[in-house]
Image (cartoon, rainbow, N blue to C red):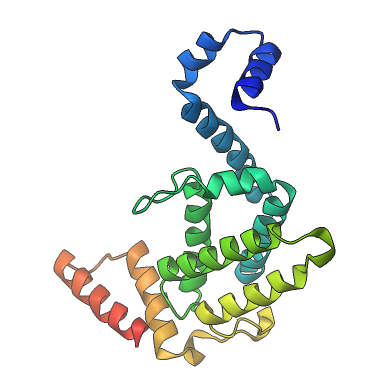
């Protein structure tokens, strides 16, 4: 395997610059690595914006499958990305993808489809998605079981989504929602628009809805 120095010299040759020029722009070896990771992951995030449907849960499933596919197609890059984490520090590079997931789940919450808050749902789904991707990366080709990803995906969705297996047209109307799902939906709507309430009333209502959604 070529050393980092060999790789750096190859990059300099391809770019037509000297090593000091490269360090001037990126500061250090780690700065160059971070730039490569950031560029690669930005391509994944931009591609995620290009597809979607009106069905929010189908979009979540597609996002999950796209995440796994990306990891399997770029295993070294993926391991490098999630190998840069530090205790107590969120991954700044993968932050945009996490924000996209939470925004999608916030829309699902407003439709009464969640039984936990969008932030909690995003955290659970992302943890399961990353875990199953890393697990599949370690498997030899003849032992790769993509059905494992589907099973973990549906189990993770069942933990955060109300009636995740119902066809789109049969999903519950607001009148049929559980108390927790209704509280999550109202909490999301309150976050979007708290007009008519004083700041204190909005905080109090938010706390009550959080309590109901956790019950």
User: Can see residue 11?
Assistant: yes
Residue 131 image point, x, y percent: 58, 64
Quarter where residue 180 is shown: bottom left
Seen at 64% across and 72% down, the residue is: 153
Query: Residue 49 vs residue 144: left or right?
Result: left
Quarter placement of the C terminus: bottom left
The front one of 39 and 168 is 39
Front residue (pair 178, 199): 178
Q: Where is residue 106 shown, x and y percent of the image?
A: 46, 65
Write the residue at 32% across / 85% down: 212
Give the left or right position of residue 197, taking residue 11 as reference.
left
Name above or below for residue 22 compared with residue 67: above
Q: Please say if 1 is above or below 71.
A: above
Is the N terminus in the top left, top right, bottom left or bottom right quadrant? top right
Residue 192 in the image, given as x and y percentages of width and height: 37, 62
Residue at 67% across, 69% down? 58
Q: Residue at x 66, y 85 (%)?
A: 166
């Amino acid at each position: 395997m070529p050393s980092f120095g060999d790789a750096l010299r190859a990059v300099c040759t391809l770019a037509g610059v000297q090593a000091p020029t490269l360090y001037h722009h990126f500061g250090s070896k780690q700065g160059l690595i971070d730039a490569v990771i950031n560029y690669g992951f930005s391509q994944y995030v931009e591609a995620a914006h290009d597809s979607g449907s009106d069905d929010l849960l189908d979009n979540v499933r597609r996002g999950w499958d796209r995440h796994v596919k990306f990891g399997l197609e770029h295993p070294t890059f993926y391991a490098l990305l999630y190998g840069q984490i530090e205790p107590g520090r969120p991954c700044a590079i993968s932050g945009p993808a996490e924000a996209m997931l939470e925004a999608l789940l916030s829309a699902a919450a407003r439709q009464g489809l969640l039984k936990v808050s969008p932030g909690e749902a995003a955290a659970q789904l992302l943890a399961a998605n990353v875990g199953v991707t890393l697990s599949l990366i370690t498997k030899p080709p003849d032992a790769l079981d993509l059905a494992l990803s589907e099973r973990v995906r549906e189990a993770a969705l069942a933990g955060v989504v109300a009636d995740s297996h119902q066809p789109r047209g049969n999903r519950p109307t607001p009148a049929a929602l559980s108390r927790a799902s209704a509280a999550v939906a109202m909490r999301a709507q309150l976050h979007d628009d708290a007009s008519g309430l004083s700041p204190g009333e909005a905080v109090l209502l938010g706390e009550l809805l959080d309590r109901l959604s956790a019950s």
